[in-house]
Structures are given as C-alpha cells and as structure tokens.
Image (cartoon, helix red, strand yellow):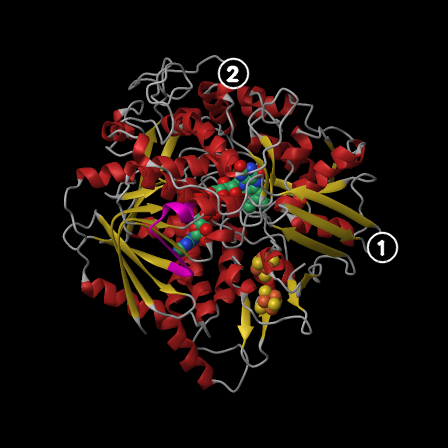
C-alpha cells in the first residue's frame, strides 16, 4: 500500500518530505503539493501519514501484489501519547485498535551528565551509569569467571 | 556545486540504533567533544526501526536472575552453527540490559508481567508498545550530539594524507541542496545499517520496496569500509528470515508469545521429525533451540518437495481480545503491510491461517547472522588475536563500527545495536584521548576526484537525455533502478537467491562474479535526473560493492555451513575439520585485489556445558 497525497487536502507544508526515510515524498512547485515520486521504493512505514497535519496522505494496497479496496487509517497523538488504528477490510469488516506510544512527555530526555564519571573510568569496560567492577557475570567489568583464553576454540 | 566543510572530533555515519547509542555514550565521556551525526534521511524516522518495533529482541534480564551473559553466549553460538566472535557477543550481553533500562526511563512503553518484570515474548525477547521507539531514541541522540546533519548521504570515507590506514573523515552530498560535503574528523563511527535489495526480492512491481528489512538499508556499512581496505568477516552468511507471505510480517511473537504452530499442506508439524536432519547434519540437529538456519532448512524441504504452502495457524491462538490485540499490534508497530495484506484479502487471523515463506536473503550484522567489519574486541576478555587496542575499532585506525556494520556478533537486534553503538562511542573517546593533538589531513586531489565522481550521474543524464527524443532508453546512461534490477538478478541467479532455491556452486559464483564485475564497470555510466536519483545511484554503488564481497566470500567458504540460508551444492556438507573458522577478507585499495584468510575461532573460557 504505497502512499498517495489527496489533492484537495495537501497544504504543501513539507512535513512528509522532511520525514520520509526513503526520500520519496517530494513537493512539486508546479502544483504546490507533495507527491510520492517512487511508489516502488515505499516501505509502507506510514511515517509520512503520521506526520501530515492535514490528514492528506493515505495508502492503498500495492496494486501488483494485493487485492484493492481495503483501507488503513492511523492517527498518532503526542499529547495523549496514543496511536489509533482503523482497518477496513475489502468486505467492509472493521477492526480498531489503540496503543500507547510513550510514557513520558516529549522533549524530556536529558543528555548524559558526565559529572558522575571519573576520568580513570574511561579505561574500564563500564558504560555510562553502569557499575564499574561489579562482581558476577552481570558485571560490566567482565568478571564472573571469564578469562582470556588463547587456546580454546569456540566449540 | 557549493562545498560545505565540517570539522568534528567524532563523526557518526548513520543515525539509526547504533549511531544514536554512539552519540549518547560519546557525550557522556567526551563532555567537550564535537560529536556529529550525519544521516542520509532524518534521524527522527530513519533506519530499520523507522516504523517502530513491537519487541526488543535482546534483553538478558540479569538483574532478575533470568539469564546470564554466558547463557546468551551459548545460545548465539548454537544458533550461528558455532561461528561467532564470543568476545563481542559476550560484550553486548553484559551491556545490553542497561541500554534497555535507559529506553524505559526515557519513556518507551515496555510491557510488564504480574511480577513487575518485563513481559517476556521468549527467552531473550521482551514486548513493547514500540511505535515511537525510534523518535524516542532519536530524542536522546539529539540531546547528546553537537550537531545532526540530516539528508546528507556519505559516499566515501577519507583516510589521512600521510597514513592510508588512518581515518580522517568522509565525503558525501546534500540530498536537498546538492552541495558537496567534506567531513574532517579525528574518529569515525560507522553505523549505517544492513543491506536489502542485494538479492531479487519476492515482491514485484509497485510492491518492489516491500522487503522485510528496510529498503533504505543499502550496504553503505560494507561498501565504505571495504574501499579503504578495512577487513571484513562473514560476508558469505545471509539472513533468510521466515515471514508471513507478501506482507513480510515477522513470526517471532507468533511462535514464541502466542504459541502459534506451523504445518505443511498435509497438516503435519514438519519441524517435529528430526531424524533426517540428524542424518544430514549430525549433532547440530539436536541444538536447543534448533538454529534458525536449520528451522528454515526443514521448511524449505517441505516446499521443495511439494508439501507447501506452509501454514501458520493463527486461528488456533487468537482466542481472547487480548491476544488478538497482541497479534495485530505486532504488525501495526513494525510491519503495517501485513495488516494491509490481511484486510485486502479478507483474512481475519482469528478465523484462518496465513502462509509463511522464506524470504529473499539479506546482508546484515545485527540479526541471526553476523556479516560486517572485522573489529577489535574488549581488552579485558578478548584473546590477543582479536584485540588491537580499541573495542569495536576496525582494522583501519580510528574507524569504529557498530550494529549491522560490525561483524562477528549476531543477535544484537535493536537493543544490542544501540548497546554496541555505546561501546564504540566510549571507545572512540578513549582513542581520541590517546591520539594527542592529531589533526586530520586530507588529500585535496583525492577529494576533488570524489567530487567529480559523485556528481557525474547528473551530467550523464543531461547528455544522454538530449541525445534521444524521449523515453528511458539511452545508450549513454543507465538508471539506478535498472542497475539495481541487474544486480538483483545476478545475485538471485548466481549467488543463492530465491529462483535457485538458495543454491549455488563454484561455477555459478565465478560466472556471477564476472557479470558483477561488468556491472561495476558500468557504474560510472549511471544517470540521475535529480538529486533523489543521485542518492539512488550512490546507494546502488554501495550495494554492488556489498554484493561483490558476498559473492567472493561465498566462493571462498567451501562447505554448506548454514543450510537454510544457502547451499553450496558442490560442497553440501558442514565441514568442521576445515571450515570451523572465520572467513576474513580484505580489498587492497592500492592494487584493487581481494585477499582471503581463514581465521581460527577463539572462545572465551566460560559458559561451556550450560543449558
Ligand atoms: C521489520 C523489522 C522488524 C524487526 N524486529 C525487531 C524486533 O522485534 N526487535 C529488535 O530488537 N530488533 C528488530 N529488528 C532489527 C533492528 O531494527 C536492527 O537490528 C537495528 O535497527 C540495527 O541497527 P543499526 O543502527 O545497525 O541500523 P539502522 O537502525 O538501520 O541504522 C542505520 C542508519 O544509517 C543511515 N545510513 C545508511 N547509509 C548511510 C549513508 N551512506 N550516509 C548517511 N547515513 C546512512 C540510515 O538512514 C539509518 O538511519 C527489526 C528490523 C526490521 C526491519
Ligand atoms: S505533510 Fe501533508 S499537507 Fe504537508 S506537504 Fe505532505 S501531504 Fe501536503
Ligand atoms: S510510507 Fe514511509 S516510505 Fe512510504 S512514502 Fe511514507 S514515509 Fe516514505
């Protein structure tokens, strides 16, 4: 189901162009709208559909692979942190689902703070906020019975 | 064309799972460093996790005593038929849990079981509501990096003018404004993902882009290091995942969590009878769990002998609304196509089975295969043969690799790729500390040569198009999509793709290499009508280099090590005596020759004899 842009809805704000991982959503200045320039390189990831504030992008099954006339609608809400799906079958059956997308507010992640790190730790195996030198196999220091082994083969 | 020059301490190529992990960890240790991510798409939704995921496939659960890194090592060794870098796998296992715990803290919804632990899908997998997995991880990377440059595709790595085995940066072009971009950097972390469309996909026509792994995984992680002479490992192994037919929905959750079963057309559970497998592959048939490739092998035999299609009995397990939701979310989070296939074909998984197929092969380092660069291991546990100073550094000084780009360690998946990115990030900071006041020196002549090469396809198109009246046929150029189809056909027919039912042999591989060489000779004739097609042109170049490595590695390994991934019909057996080794290759940039080595397996003195 590659995507297509509905002419009456597109406001040419470029959101889909910014996001498409396949670089196939482009704007055409001549029509002042976005369009899918390479449907056969569309992964149906729906990143563009989720990003379009005008709900101007829809999908239809790949014409060369699937029967037509089914629909998938999605709406993703970063305020409520949910995503809603509505799947309409070719024979008109409908399935609806809603799932959470995040448990914290957007833009709340902090960069790592190096204040807790000591310069000497740069040489050991522990990563940021891992306990250096924890004993046992969980340890970031690689204890717990591991030794160098120059002879053995990996069985 | 305008030129932009960027200077950084650490340049991360690719802002996917591994790249984001590298930025985060490098920032922790390198408070004042200039850390730059360059990404051909937009890190918000880029890489294999762009759509989201419904599970984190690598979580050890050490804090709850669920498993140990040693258990994981045993599992991965068995699954890869013995050929793994134990030091690297163990290293991922001891750092992956802390990475997953960061994801939870950042707001990734991880499902919980009644006892408060992460809800297990299988022994190593945990279930998530992962539609926003990538935007969440990208937010952490944005907070960490000094600068993120989206929509710049890297085409070549640069080595130092005075030392051809020392990394000094990279070049590429801005896909939006067409500028030529030069990056000078003291260290580079290669995190540019795996490779799809190396082999012809089962999908056709408008659905061509529907492969299981993302079509924007274009082999840059292999082509870039190969061309500067980095050693590569395991490029012969390719992943053939079993997937729902046409939609490519993954099967993990269905088998492991929902406990669905698969049968052949005669309603037989074909995986149960192992006698024949034991006769052919000895004790490997008794590995628990059965290695991914051998499970494929059993399925392929059914299909080959006419007992297909293989049926996944979803209708037997979706008996509650909860399970129905779990089944649908699995696909809506990471493979929406499967929901489309079901709805378009009027298949309600609650009511009837779906077909399974083995897909076309993919090249990658993070899944149930371990192709990629040959990297140094952690100094505390790696045997000296696998350790040249800096963890995850390739054989090119200052060039690090993680995720799909780093070979040897399989089963990293999303969480392990992020963890490995972190390992590489920290290691790069250490490398910088030790390399004093090195400043990268770039050979201007080389850079100018790359500039000409990079934009050549635009000129080719202009010239070739004016020569003809109209249409797509010109003797002066070939379109990237035509070149890609040619590549896929060669690989499919000669290197063990779908049409030969995953078989190949030396005559095929040698013939395939000849045809591939001619394709490579034709690459300077690529024609691009705009910057988007220019990106496609360079993606094709990277795929062709990847494919060449695959072809040559496959020819070198004279055995069938991973039946179910591919078969060397001239060497149909597993040959532990001669081939229980790594195949390590090197392309020599000064004389353009490939050389191959068998490198012995060195294990860690741990983890023997566990379940
Ligand atoms: C459908 C599907 C289902 C999966 N299921 C699971 C699962 O359930 N659980 C799990 O844990 N894992 C799963 N995985 C695997 C997981 O996604 C990968 O293991 C992981 O993303 C690999 O990380 P990476 O950083 O190496 O590559 P990626 O995340 O793919 O990142 C590579 C990045 O490099 C960029 N790039 C590439 N080339 C260039 C270039 N030349 N210049 C600039 N930038 C470039 C790309 O745009 C991309 O952003 C799944 C993957 C897919 C596709
Ligand atoms: S995001 Fe929507 S409105 Fe904006 S350009 Fe794309 S299709 Fe048009
Ligand atoms: S569905 Fe994904 S690949 Fe297809 S156009 Fe939209 S963003 Fe691009």
Asked whether mark 1 and ligand 3 are closer than 8 Å, the reply comes as no
User: Which element is circle 2 on?
Assistant: loop
Q: How many residues crowd around disc 1 within 10 Å: few (fewer than 14), some, or many (20 or more)? A: some
Identify the residue position indicated by label 2 in the image: B65
The residue nearer to you, when weighing B32 against A151, is B32
Q: Position of residue B372 (x, y in %)?
A: 39, 41
Residue beneath the point at 20% across and 38% down:
B433
Is the residue B262 above or below the residue A5 in the image?
above
Q: Position of residue B604 (x, y in %)?
A: 36, 20
Could you tell whether A100 is left or right of B350 in the image?
left
Quarter of image, res B461: bottom left
Residue B148, magenta (yes or no): yes
Pointer 1 and pointer 2 on the same chain:
no
The residue nearer to you, when weighing A89 against A101, is A101
Quarter of image, res B231: top left
The residue range painted magenta reads: B141-153
Is the residue B254 above or below the residue B506 in the image?
above
User: Which element is circle 1 on?
Assistant: loop
Residue B496, magenta (yes or no): no
Identify the residue position indicated by label 1 in the image: A92
Q: Quadrant of ligand 2?
A: bottom right
The residue nearer to you, when weighing B472 against B35, is B35
Q: Position of residue B541 (x, y in %)?
A: 41, 60
Could you tell whether B373 is left or right of B105 in the image?
left
């Amino acid at each position: 189901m590659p995507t297509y842009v509905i002419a009456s809805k597109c406001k040419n704000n470029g959101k889909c162009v910014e996001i498409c991982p396949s670089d196939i959503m482009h704007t055409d200045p001549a029509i002042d709208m976005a369009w899918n320039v390479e449907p056969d390189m569309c992964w149906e990831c729906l990143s563009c559909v989720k990003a379009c504030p005008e709900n101007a992008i829809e999908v239809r099954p790949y014409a060369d692979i699937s029967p037509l006339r089914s629909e998938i609608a999605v709406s993703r809400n970063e305020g409520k942190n949910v995503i809603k799906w509505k799947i309409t079958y070719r024979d008109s059956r409908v399935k609806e689902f809603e799932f959470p997308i995040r448990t914290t507010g957007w833009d709340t992640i902090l960069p790592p703070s190096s204040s807790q790190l000591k310069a000497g730790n740069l040489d050991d195996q522990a990563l940021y906020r891992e306990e250096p030198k924890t004993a046992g196999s969980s340890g970031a220091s690689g204890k717990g019975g591991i030794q160098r082994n120059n002879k053995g083969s990996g069985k | 064309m305008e030129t932009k020059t960027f200077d950084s301490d650490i340049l991360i190529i690719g802002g996917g799972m591994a790249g984001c992990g590298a930025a985060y960890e490098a920032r922790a240790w390198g408070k004042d460093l200039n850390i730059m991510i360059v990404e051909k798409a937009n890190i918000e939704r880029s890489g294999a996790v762009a759509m989201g995921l419904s599970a984190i496939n690598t979580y050890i659960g050490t804090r709850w005593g669920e498993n140990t890194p040693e258990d994981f090592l045993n599992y991965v060794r068995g699954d890869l038929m013995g050929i793994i870098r134990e030091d690297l796998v163990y290293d991922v296992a001891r750092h992956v849990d802390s990475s997953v715990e960061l994801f939870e803290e950042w707001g990734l919804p991880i499902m919980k079981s009644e006892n408060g632990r992460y809800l297990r899908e299988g022994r190593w997998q945990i279930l998530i509501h992962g539609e926003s997995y990538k935007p969440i991880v990208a937010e952490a990377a944005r907070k960490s990096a000094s600068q993120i440059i989206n929509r710049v595709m890297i085409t070549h790595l640069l080595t130092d003018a005075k030392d051809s085995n020392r990394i000094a940066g990279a070049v590429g072009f801005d896909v939006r404004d067409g500028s030529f971009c030069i990056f000078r950097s003291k260290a580079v972390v290669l995190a540019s993902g795996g490779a799809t469309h190396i082999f012809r996909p089962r999908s056709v026509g408008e659905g061509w882009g529907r492969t299981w792994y993302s079509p924007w995984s274009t082999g840059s992680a292999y082509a870039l290091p190969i061309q500067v002479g980095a050693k590569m490992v395991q490029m012969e192994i390719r992943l053939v995942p079993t997937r729902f037919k046409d939609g490519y929905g993954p099967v993990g959750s269905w088998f492991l969590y929902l406990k669905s079963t698969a049968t052949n057309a005669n309603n037989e559970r074909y995986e149960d009878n192992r006698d024949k497998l034991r006769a052919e592959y000895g004790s490997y048939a008794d590995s628990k769990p059965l290695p991914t490739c051998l499970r494929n092998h059993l399925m392929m035999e059914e299909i080959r002998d006419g007992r297909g299609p293989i049926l996944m009995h979803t209708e037997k397990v979706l008996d509650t609304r909860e399970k129905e939701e779990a089944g649908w979310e699995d696909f809506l989070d990471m493979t929406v196509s499967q929901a489309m296939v079901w709805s378009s074909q009027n298949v309600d998984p609650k009511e009837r089975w779906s077909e399974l197929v083995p897909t076309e092969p993919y090249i990658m380092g993070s899944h149930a295969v371990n192709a990629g660069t040959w990297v140094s291991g952690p100094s505390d546990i790696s045997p000296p043969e696998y350790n040249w100073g800096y963890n995850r550094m390739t054989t090119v000084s200052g060039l690090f690799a993680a995720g799909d780009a780093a070979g040897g360690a399989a089963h990293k998946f999303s969480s392990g790729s992020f963890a490995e990115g972190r390992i590489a990030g920290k290691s790069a900071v250490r490398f910088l500390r030790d390399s004093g006041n090195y400043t990268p020196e770039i050979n201007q002549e080389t850079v100018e040569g790359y500039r000409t090469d990079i934009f050549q396809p635009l000129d080719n198109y202009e010239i070739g198009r004016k020569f003809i009246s109209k249409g797509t046929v010109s003797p002066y150029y070939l379109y990237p999509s035509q070149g890609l189809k040619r590549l896929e056909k060669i690989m499919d027919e000669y290197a063990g793709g779908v049409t030969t039912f995953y078989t190949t042999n030396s005559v095929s591989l040698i013939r395939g290499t000849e045809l591939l060489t001619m394709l490579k000779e034709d690459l300077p004739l690529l024609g691009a009508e705009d910057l988007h097609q220019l990106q496609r042109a360079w993606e094709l170049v990277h795929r062709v280099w990847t494919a060449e490595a695959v072809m040559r590695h496959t020819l070198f390994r004279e055995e069938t090590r991973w039946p179910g991934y591919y078969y060397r019909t001239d060497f149909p057996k597993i040959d532990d005596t001669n081939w229980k080794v790594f195949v390590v290759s090197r392309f020599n940039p000064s004389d353009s020759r490939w050389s191959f080595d068998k490198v012995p397996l060195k294990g860690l003195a741990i983890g023997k004899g566990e379940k």
